[in-house]
Amino acid sequence: MNPLGLYVPGTSAVHRAPAGVKLAAMVVAGVLSVLVDRPWEVGVALGVVLLGYRTAGLSSRVVCGQLRPLLWIGACTAVFHLLVNGWERALVVVGVLAALVLLAALVTLTTRTTDLVDALVAASRPLRVFGVDPERVGLMVALGVRCVPVVVGLAEEVREAQRARGLAASPRAFAVPLIVRSLRHADALGEALMARGLED
Amino acid sequence: MPVIEARQVGHEYGERTVLSGVDLVLREQRIGIVGANGSGKSTFARTLNGLVLPTSGRVLVDGLDTRTQGREVRRRVGFCFTDPDAQIVMPTVAEDVAFGLRRRGLSKAEVGERVERTLVSFGLLGHADHPAHLLSGGQKQLLALASVLVVEPDVLVMDEPTTLLDLRNAQHTAAVVGGLAQQVVLVTHHLDLLEGFDRVLVFDEGRVVCDDLPADAVRYYRKLMS
């Protein structure tokens, strides 16, 4: 299982669908989500998304993996709405949140980053008139995706170093080395990009 | 073979001099560089494709000046870093190998064909769609090497590529490098990798203190370090 929501190879219809179509569907779903108002509508939305996971051949473990980071925020939102607006509203809000997160994860799990980047570059071309460089937008997205596991790895190393030295959990002792190492990595990445022909 | 010329190359980081009066012409196929930490060898390697511009002197690759023709020089001179994590820029293996090719305006089919060929030759085809961060250290270094070589540079500069690898992966990487047709400039602390090289430079305090065949240069270096 890939805990970071990166591409899982496959040949399903969802995998084969053009990246631009999947991104557009995600945007449309996001806009339409404000119209969802009843629990049965949430059920339909979740059902459609889960059908997408099934079609893509992704297991329920993958689905749970995508929802895990939502646990705390989902629980807090549910409690708030339960107290203020009642159980139906709590169910709708948390259900819509889960459906959108699952849909976004389905797109990244079934689409190569290169294809996503190409679609984003194509979509940003009209922004050239405002001075936006579409290639740069695409590269930024790709580097962002690439850096997630790197920073997670750095954080784990910092935590291990703290444990090895018997240091108690301290936000400052964790954050400072993590930021310093992340900045060093950014420097090295910049040098590597230059070495590989990206001039500025 | 390409000709690399370093003409009275000097470099300073603030008030610290890291290179001083380096004057060399490199035309051999296999060139090794050894030296203690801080001796200036990595900085010198970085001057060869313009990652570092010398504060004095010039570096020319086939007559192209790294200061004024950096883009052209980097097309000819590939660079492989010590830490592969710092040079893998795309999320999956195949995407990272394709990165340099896509920026050269090749067609999608041509990129795909060259990526596949490269992955096969580096034994990474089975990992094509795998996230790069899940590879082992040795596989990551092979990926970094593949991503540099896929664009077919004339020269490959490698800065301690085996330092973070275990013996098996270091030997594998060395075997891959040994089979390359390109001119290779290898900065290393692993002296056994220099066996069969044409020329070895020993750096000390920013200067080339020995420039000889591997056996003699390594003997000199061992004596220097003792």
Image (cartoon, rainbow, N blue to C red):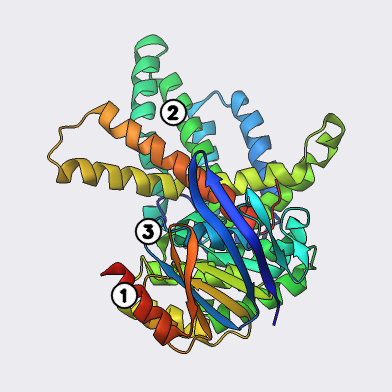
Which residue type carries mark 2? Answer: Val
Residue position marked by numbered label 1 in the rendering: B222
Rendered location of residue B165, percent (x, y): 35, 70
Which residue type carries mark 3? Answer: Asn
Residue plotted at (15% across, 32% down) = A168
Query: Which of these two is toward me, B94 or B153?
Result: B153
Rendered location of residue B144, percent (x, y): 52, 67
| CA–CA distance in space, label 2 to label 3 | 56 Å
Which residue type carries mark 1? Answer: Arg
Residue plotted at (63% across, 67% down) = B78
Q: Secondary structure at mark 2?
A: helix
Residue position marked by numbered label 3 in the rendering: B37
Classify mark 2: residues with Cα within 10 Å, few (<14), some (14-19) or many (20+).
some
What is the chain letter for disc 3? B
Q: Which mark is residue A94?
A: 2
Q: Along the horizontal axis of the image, is B177 left or right of A151? A: right
Question: Is the Cβ of the residue at disc 1 closer than 8 Å to that at disc 2?
Answer: no
Question: Is the Cβ of the residue at disc 2 closer than 8 Å to that at disc 3?
Answer: no
